[in-house]
Image: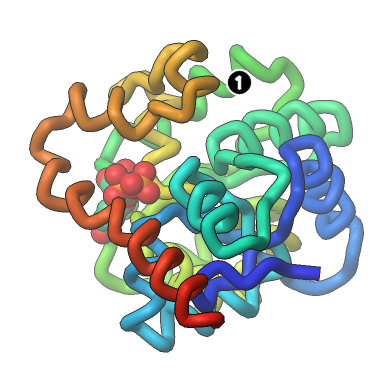
Amino acid sequence: MKTDILGVYIDDLILEEAVDAGTALLEEPGFHYVVTPNPEFILSARKDESFRSVLNQADLALPDGIGVVYAAKILGRPLKGRAPGVDFAQALMARMAQTGKSLYLLGAKPGVAEKAAENLRMAHPGLKICGTHDGYFTEDEPVVEAIRASGADVIFVCLGAPKQELWMEKNGPQTGARLTVGLGGCLDVFAGTVQRAPEGWQKAGLEWLYRLIKEPSRIGRMSRLPLILVDALGARLGGK
Ligand code: UDP
């Protein structure tokens, strides 16, 4: 049962439940994909039908940002909490290290995925990373072929939204992987080129503020985000 947040259907799962669900998808035949909507996704999806449709057909849609949780509350459909994509990815890798499933890292600038792989192998002993590719390619086919040849069970697709979601929907089934997860800038975090907010900031729901302080050039992009709360209030008052 999904929760409708301004037209985007979100799974009301805490992190542990999300990881259980992701692990279960890995055991099911066929191809599956996971999306991690934050306020920026939801605002874009309101205007972009193809993006909304890809998000709403995902096997799992995790509430990535605190803004999604606030919007849900305003709408009168509270969620249990956030399940950030980066935490989902870490917990999934911990499980994969135990079960022997293999991971392919796709995205970010040249060199970043390789550095991320190096760090992740150290953080999760036993994790099989079967390949990497940067996110600045022009043709999908050679990339799909490389992933297929690697025998990956899971792909982290980190191309930014909506590119990564559209890529997963179009190319995912041809890769032979069971599960793909759209994870935005996560490879930069895993590689250590971008720092995540300290835990205190995360718990206070201020990760967005930390990111803005570290990357002030995001101000234009982020200044729209409070709109999700305005839209939620409008929808609530309008009885939608
Ligand atoms: N990116 C990519 N290919 C592109 C555009 C972006 O691989 O064509 C990468 C970019 O290098 C970064 C990530 O996608 O690592 C997107 O980061 P962003 O900060 O936009 O994502 P967020 O974390 O906000 O979802």
User: Looking at the picture, which amino acid does disc 1 mark?
Assistant: Arg
> Which residue is pictured at 9% across the width and 38% down the height?
217
Q: Relative to 222, is 140 above or below? A: below
Q: Residue 119 or 71: which is nearer the viewer? A: 71
Residue 128 in the figure: left or right of residue 5: right
Position of the N terminus, as image quadrant, is bottom right
Nearest the viewer among 51 and 115 is 51
The percent coordinates of residue 73 (x first, y second) are: 58, 53
* Display colour scheme: rainbow
User: Residue at image x 38%, y 78%?
Assistant: 46
Determine whether the residue tagged by mark 1 lies in a helix, strand or loop.
helix
Quarter of the view holding residue 125: top right
* Residue 170 left/right relative to 221: right
Residue 190 in view in this figure: yes
Q: Residues within 10 Å of mark 1 (few under 14, many from 20)?
A: some
Examine the rendered structure and indicate whether residue 196 appears above or below residue 41.
above
- Tell me if the residue at label 1 has its CB under 8 Å from ligand 1: no
Q: Quadrant of residue 239?
A: bottom right
Residue designated by label 1 = 121
Say which quadrant the C terminus sits in. bottom right
Q: Where in the figure is residue 218, as x and y percent of width and height?
A: 16, 42
Residue at 39% from the left image edge and 27% from the top image edge: 206
On the image, the x and y values in percent for residue 20 come to: 85, 44
> Is 219 left, or right, of 106 in this rendering?
left
In the figure, 31 relative to 123: above or below? below
